[in-house]
Image: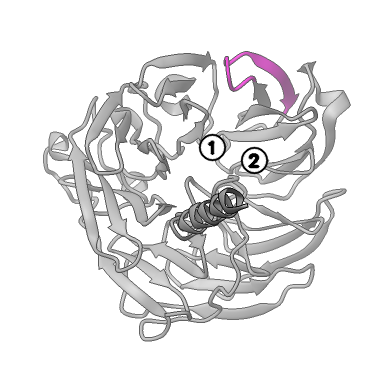
């Protein structure tokens, strides 16, 4: 009996120790761990300003449009310095430095800031480039490290203490807007959509950056790839590109299926819910619903609906049989996800454009405008504005989508990173 009691006590002690040492909830990639822009966090703030509900504010060493991500006690984001901060910059592109930054989640102190020079030719600064800069891709992180994509300067990997693990060249092609796709992590791979740089999706090994597989002929896609669930407990990699939605085996890169898609370049991330994918994109704005899991051309068998509303840049969220997003033109949409019918279409209370994507948490929709704060809406099929929050002391652009975890919102501008919460 005494041996059994001792074993029980040891087991309870072990369990208690592990519970207390569990890391904080992570937001480990662009639009959260699922890539769907949804947080299970409760108690999120509805209102804030420069004097209210700002837990901490950290000055950043450079500009950037990448979103913050979280792993354990660290917040990671990217930035750039040295070249291209204004359209009048006539400096040397070789002076560009590309930063990966770690910030302490509890107090906002910068834990480390590491940077690398360009890997290939730097795209010359233009008005379109300076609009979002050279650090647009959001990093991805896990226990093995943090991985960032800098377009023609390739993929950079650091361990969690800031030691450079490797760099990988994924092409030097450019387009007018520059680079925008973010990496995602799958098993032992870092998956990067380098459509703009080399018309290729790469799966790189986390350990050394070597190519595990690559899928070529990826056309005009600025979108971040998505790992989606299919029947039987399997997963597929989905890439939405010009004219086609593509499904791949994420372990091998083998193309599994294609579906006729949006006849224009694509930026928004594909989101999924219960076996259905929702795909937005194009300057004329379209939305498509399709089932994954097919083989070959699935246009006639798996495409469920297509409508002529959508977004050119921003990505949606799914909530209770509805899709929600705010287009880059400042219009909030709610669609019936079953048939694509518009439930509401409302102009936001601002004339600002949007680059950031909508985030859902605690029954609220958070819409980050570039110049006029964050609009908070009730998550429901009736347009209801709850608040509009501006940080009056920060005149920089808000290009990044928020990260959400444990009652806090992490929001960055070109100049600062904020932790926002009403639970100090």
Disc 2 marks which residue?
270
Give the quarter of the image for residue 237.
top right
Query: Where in the figure is residue 96, as x and y percent of width and height?
Result: 18, 40
**In the picture provided, is 185 more to the left or to the right than 291?**
left
**Residue extending farthest bottom:** 51
Q: Nearer the viewer, residue 66 or 217?
A: 66
Magenta span of residues: 249-260
Residue at 20% from the left image edge and 43% from the top image edge: 114
Query: Where in the figure is residue 124, as x and y percent of width and height?
Result: 25, 36
**Cβ–Cβ below 8 Å for labels 2 and 1?**
yes
Residue at 56% from the left image edge and 78% from the top image edge: 46
Q: Earlier in the sequence, mark 2 or mark 1?
A: 1
Q: Is residue 251 located in the magenta-colored stretch of the structure? A: yes
Residue at 40% from the left image edge and 37% from the top image edge: 179
**In the picture provided, is 162 more to the left or to the right than 335?**
left
Q: Nearer the viewer, residue 141 or 271?
A: 141
Give the quarter of the image for residue 197.
top left
Distance of mark 2 from mark 1, alpha carbons?
8 Å
Q: Which mark is residue 209?
A: none
Does 22 appear above or below 244? below
Q: Quadrant of the C terminus?
A: bottom left
Q: Is residue 243 visible?
A: no
């Amino acid at each position: 009996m005494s041996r059994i009691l001792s074993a029980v006590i040891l087991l309870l002690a072990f369990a208690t120790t592990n519970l207390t040492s569990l890391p904080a909830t992570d937001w480990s990639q662009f639009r959260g761990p699922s890539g769907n822009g949804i947080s299970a966090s409760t108690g999120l703030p509805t209102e804030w300003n420069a004097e209210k509900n700002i837990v901490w504010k950290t000055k950043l060493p450079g500009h950037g449009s990448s979103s913050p991500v979280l792993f354990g006690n660290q917040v990671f984001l990217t930035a750039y310095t040295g070249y291209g901060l204004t359209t009048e910059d006539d400096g040397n592109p070789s002076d560009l430095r590309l930063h990966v930054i770690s910030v302490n989640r509890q107090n906002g102190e910068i834990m480390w800031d590491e940077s690398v020079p360009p890997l290939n030719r730097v795209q010359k600064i233009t008005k379109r480039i300076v609009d979002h800069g050279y650090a647009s891709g959001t990093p991805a992180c896990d226990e093995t490290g943090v991985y960032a994509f800098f377009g023609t300067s390739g993929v950079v990997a650091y361990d969690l203490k800031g030691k450079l693990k490797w760099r990988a060249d994924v092409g030097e092609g450019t387009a007018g807007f520059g680079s925008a796709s973010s990496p995602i992590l799958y098993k032992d791979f870092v998956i990067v959509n380098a459509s703009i740089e080399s018309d290729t999706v790469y799966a790189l090994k986390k350990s050394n950056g070597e190519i595990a597989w690559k899928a070529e002929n990826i056309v005009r896609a600025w979108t971040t790839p998505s790992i989606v669930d299919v029947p039987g407990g399997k997963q597929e990699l989905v890439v939405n590109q010009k004219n086609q939605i593509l499904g791949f085996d994420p372990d091998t890169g083998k193309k599994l299926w294609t579906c006729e898609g949006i006849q224009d370049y694509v930026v928004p991330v594909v989101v999924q819910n219960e076996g259905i994918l929702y795909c937005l994109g194009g300057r004329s704005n379209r939305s498509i619903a399709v089932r994954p899991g097919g083989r070959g051309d699935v246009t006639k068998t798996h495409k469920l609906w297509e409508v002529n509303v959508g977004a050119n840049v921003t990505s949606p969220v799914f909530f209770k049989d509805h899709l929600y997003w705010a287009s880059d033109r400042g219009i909030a949409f709610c669609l019936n996800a079953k048939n694509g019918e518009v439930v509401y279409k409302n102009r936001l209370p601002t004339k600002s454009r949007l680059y950031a994507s909508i985030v859902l948490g605690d029954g609220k929709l958070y819409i980050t405008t570039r110049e006029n704060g964050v609009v908070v809406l009730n998550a429901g099929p009736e347009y209801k504005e709850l608040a509009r929050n501006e940080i009056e002391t920060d005149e920089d652009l808000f290009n990044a989508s928020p990260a959400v975890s444990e009652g806090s919102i992490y929001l960055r501008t070109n100049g600062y990173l904020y932790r926002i919460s009403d639970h100090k």
